[in-house]
Image (cartoon, rainbow, N blue to C red):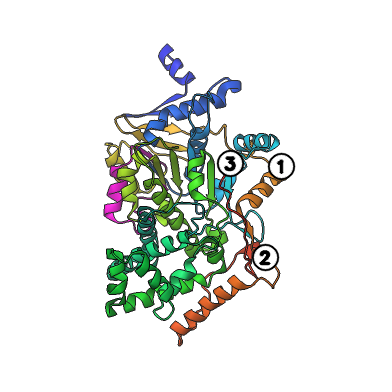
Amino acid sequence: MTLKQLFLYFFGFVGGTPGVPSLRLGFWPFPIFGKWLALWRFKRRLRISALQRHAVVIGKSGSGKSELLKLIILALKSKWIRFVQRKRTVLVLDPHGEVVQECAKNTFFVREAEAALAAGKKPDLVLISPSLRPGYLPTLNPFDLRGQSVSFRMAEVLAQHLTAAFTTMLSKGDMKLSFNMETLLTPMFTVLISMSAARKRTPLTLFDLEQFLDDERNSRFLSFAHNRFHSEGLGQFFRSTFHSPLFRATKFALRVKLSRLLTSRLFVNLLARPRSTWNLEQCMKSGKTVLIDASQSALGREVSEIYGRTITALVQSYAFLRNPSQFHTPVFFLIDEAASFITPEIETILTQSRKYGLHLLLAMQMVKQGGISSGLHDAIMGNTALKILGHSGHRSKKVLSDEMELSTGTLPKLSVGWFVVQRDGAKAEKLKMPTSWLGEKHTVSDSRFAKLRTFFVRQYHAAVSVPAATKSSESKCQGAHQNLNQLLPHCNVPSPFEARGNNEIRHLPEHGENVPHDL
């Protein structure tokens, strides 16, 4: 072995295929400094500047993709010199719950959280999860804007992004229905947001949207629209176009689909309760690590998807409401299994959101997963400065090798934990992810995590199991089911969603906890 080979081996270089050098990031012969050096080398190879220009991770289940995401979260939050490095918000949306639950129990975050609580402060960690404690769920009402000054611009931006999320979910690819839904929903959301902001006590909910769609019960919404927007095009829309016979079928379809969702008590508690238990916009400004568990095992696939899409739409909205000429806390938004949560509006984020301080990392199992359109796929590949490929199928390898300007034959075989990484303007590298920050050794026990769990439950969740005397929202849920049966009198339509495990809900409370604005 030559001196050069010995030097390269000492620092973890292990050869590789022609044009794609290989490096073990966790290799270091001195264990005392090994894990810190591994994290530093990991950050050097990925570069925060590249993550700020968006990233995409492709890897099959079992490729080590989840461990990679946890390392990226640690890299974004680790601070070598605390008073020099400015704060960053890391927002993680996980449809399985595995990544956020393991991150929350990682010693890196637990030690900081324990120290903060001991000092009487709130931790840098925020955990939003439907499975933290039986009978408790987080609530995020898109119309709960208490304490905010809502301009017409803000109402329109929120309405546009919420429309994109709901249209994608409810139209199921029907282009004609999708167009008609957008035409109806954007003005309706604008009115509901403006009307909710004008109410001093109880905000509006998605139950009010269902009522707005019923021509026999929507007089108060139309009256507000006529009075508030009497001299604008929006007022004209509700005086004439809204009542067109052409939209009757669309209103009917929307009412059926929305009533079906509102029969799910999980959906109601997550998105249709009047008062939110956590504030997404404040989370984005906080500089904290915000872990959102949208686990399909706890919520069911459809509720999980619409919950995640609503959060994604609100993140987009709050980002675009920022003034691009002012400094804002950068938000790194990591979406695992991104195909379940993104909408065509994601293209706007990829092309414009950097100046608003929103940076995306999309993780998927394969290219064009979940029916992602060719246009959206091209937008993702063309606007991400960091591309990471793990063990994948032939199709994904072919697409990523073209993006990385490598031949398929040159692309090395990848075992678990190995990834090919390419930044814009740099050559591709094959990297072995370090494991010194992961695993059971760096995960605290349930008993140690119990105090933090109690804090998260009290701070960001509300009880959903209360005495039978509190039934006003239960009656709304039952009313939605009755409306659905009236709309479809000849169909046997059961509630499509079931609470899983210990989260079974019998009665819905009128919880009045204040939203924690001071995160």
**Residue pointed to by mark 3:** 125
Any magenta on residue 385?
Answer: yes
Give the number of the mark in front: 1 or 2.
2
Q: Quadrant of residue 178?
A: bottom left
Q: CA distance from mark 2 to mark 3?
A: 26 Å
Answer whether labels 1 and 2 touch (C-beta < 8 Å).
no
Q: Is residue 212 visible?
A: yes
Mark 3 near mark 1, Cβ–Cβ under 8 Å? no
Does residue 512 sit above or below 123 in this rendering? Answer: below
Q: Amino acid at mark 1?
A: Arg
Q: Which residues are magenta?
A: 363-390
Image height of 445 relative to 112, above or below: below
Query: Residue 174, image x and y in percent?
Result: 31, 69
Asked whether residue 27 is in view, the answer is: no
Q: Residue 359's spot in the image, x, y percent?
A: 39, 41
Q: Position of residue 278 (x, y in %)?
A: 56, 52
* Tag 2: amino acid: Ser
Amino acid carrying label 3: it is Leu
Q: Is 354 positioned to the left or the right of 135 in the image?
A: left
